[in-house]
Image (spheres, rainbow, N blue to C red):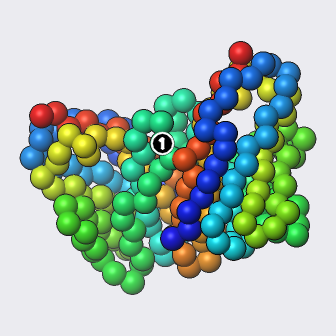
Amino acid sequence: GENVEQHPSTLSVQEGDSAVIKCTYSDSASNYFPWYKQELGKGPQLIIDIRSNVGEKKDQRIAVTLNKTAKHFSLHITETQPEDSAVYFCAAPNTDKLIFGTGTRLQVFP
Amino acid sequence: SAVISQKPSRDICQRGTSLTIQCQVDSQVTMMFWYRQQPGQSLTLIATANQGSEATYESGFVIDKFPISRPNLTFSTLTVSNMSPEDSSIYLCSVGGQGRGYTFGSGTRLTVV
């Protein structure tokens, strides 16, 4: 089955700096890699995802890169803002089930 | 993407009692998933609920403790039975898979006292 590892567990950055969160997965057959943002008291919200037929995807200040050979994918947030502060989870599928990473608590200081 | 309504949003329950959580989706979906998120932790899949068949439980979760109903393609319930303080968590339903992205409800924050 799929195993997902996520690093770092906590990340503190100054407003305007970039933040990078990395995940590795074990199942080479996985083909879909979402990233979720969870704010306090809320459910996870999908912020970006990537499928295995592309190596990078961007959406404004957020980007995800995928290296299928190395079986890792990363979330990049540029020009961070205080409202980016939240817990971020990566995930990968195991058949039709999503397996989540352990989460990264991102704090953006003004 | 699908919109999920989950209720209750939170509850405080006495140990030994049961709580049923409801999940309503605005479109028909084949697969629904129930997750548990313990305080400060990641999401752990409890079970997959398909309409017309029994739910499939993950290792460590059993039907007697977490019975699930899936009466139609837009609705599911999860019951947390005979609760203890260790059951205090956020419970989340989700839909997706089969080539589509996954959407989550806002969660039910359960505190067992």
- In the rendered image, the residue lying farthest to the left is A16
Name the one closer to the observer, B69 or A94.
B69
Residue A35 is at least partly visible in this image? yes
Dividing the picture into quadrants, the one containing residue A45 is bottom left
Q: Quarter of the image containing the N terminus of chain A?
A: bottom right
Left-right relation of B82 to B32: right
Chain assignment, label 1: A
Front residue of B98 and A39: A39
Q: Nearer the viewer, residue A3 or A34?
A: A34
| Res A71 visible | no
Residue A40 spot, x, y in % from top left: 42, 36
Q: Quadrant of the C terminus of chain A?
A: top left
Percent across and percent down for residue B82 are: 86, 28
Amino acid at the residue labelled 1? Lys
Mark 1: secondary structure: loop
The image quadrant that residue B91 belongs to is top right
Residue under circle 1? A42
Give the vertical position of A58 relative to A104 (above or below).
below
Q: Residue B10 appears in which quarter of the rendering?
A: top right
Return the x and y of residue A52 as percentages of the image width and height.
42, 78
